[in-house]
Image: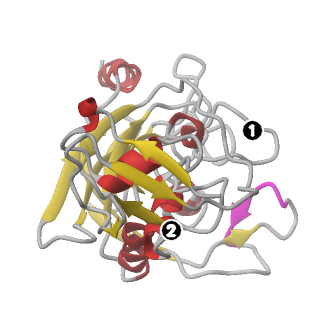
Amino acid sequence: MPLVVAVPAEAAGERLDRFLASLPEVGSRAAAERLLGEGAALVDGEVRPKSHRLAGGEHVELTVPEAAPPGLEREEVPLRIAYEDDDVLVIDKPAGVVVHPSPGHASGTLVHGLVGLAAGGEDEERPGIVHRLDRDTSGLLVVARSDEAYARLQELVRDRALERRYKALVRGRPRSWTGRIEAPIGRDRHDPTRHSLDTDTPREAVTHFEVERLLGRHAQLDVRLETGRTHQIRVHLAAIGLPVVGDPVYGVPDEQLKRQFLHAWRLAFPHPLRDERIEVESPLPPELQAALARFDS
């Protein structure tokens, strides 16, 4: 039996896909897009595109699946939206927040904070997620808001067209002001909880860096990822004798900092669905600014 919903006056000007996603019977932009693509959502009896702007007062007729798969429940998670449009979000993630559910992290993730805002892909526990940041790495990552944007963002990641730059503080002084690290990474063959160059499952990994400042026995680096393997920056820098400060696994623990000094400060990419380029930057968090001041004293 189709469901008929009257569009309230306050929804005037809202996109059709967003309005549908707000309905509890639909629940997400991805589900809304599927209904529209299948002709299962009509506005006053007519098929409309997802970008159709509602006027208020229309009647939307839905044919929804009888048993929709269970979805994630929205939670209050600390995050800042650094950029937003109808297709993508750029999130400024604080340290300490896991990106998506995983063993040991069933709630409180970035994905839980984005329920209703992000969509795309077939994994219901990772809607819209095309790349990640480690739990204790802060900074920028892009999230899709539709299946179409998700597919295109995945292509950009594969084509290495997603510019990802990080600030890192390392112990040691690099041999040159710029460097390129090319060394395959995979799960460590002796410790499956770690990633390393000593692996039976190597995957290509390339990291670029340049020195911004020398701070006694330490150096502040600007790091650019060419590939995006798990723990790539931390593993690569440790491999060349420049362990990240505050990293208890691959680097040098720091009792005062209590997190790794790694911040995704810049994200730039061609818009997935429009002819424009998105460039977003994030300031260094206060605890990392304080750490720099301490090492510079």
| Foreground residue among 259 and 57 | 57
Which image quarter is the N terminus in?
bottom right
Residue 158 drawn above or below residue 255: below
- Circle nearer the N terminus (1, 2): 2
Q: Which residue is mark 2?
A: 40
Taking 49 as reference, is 134 left or right?
right
Residue 105: assigned label: 1
At mark 2, the secondary structure is loop
Q: Residue at x 60, y 19 (%)?
A: 255
- Please tell me how crowded label 2 is: few (under 14), some (14-19), or many (20+) other residues with Cα within 10 Å: some
The location of residue 94, given as percent across then percent down, is 46, 31
- Residue 192 falls in which quadrant of the image? bottom right
Q: Amino acid at mark 1?
A: His
- Please tell me how crowded label 1 is: few (under 14), some (14-19), or many (20+) other residues with Cα within 10 Å: few
Q: Is residue 141 magenta?
A: no
Taking 249 as reference, is 191 left or right?
right
Q: Residue at x 30, y 58 (%)?
A: 87
The location of residue 86, given as percent across then percent down, is 27, 54
Q: Residue furthest right?
A: 190
Q: Is the stretch drawn in magenta largely helix, strand or loop?
A: loop
Q: Which residues are magenta?
A: 192-197
Q: Amino acid at mark 2?
A: Ala
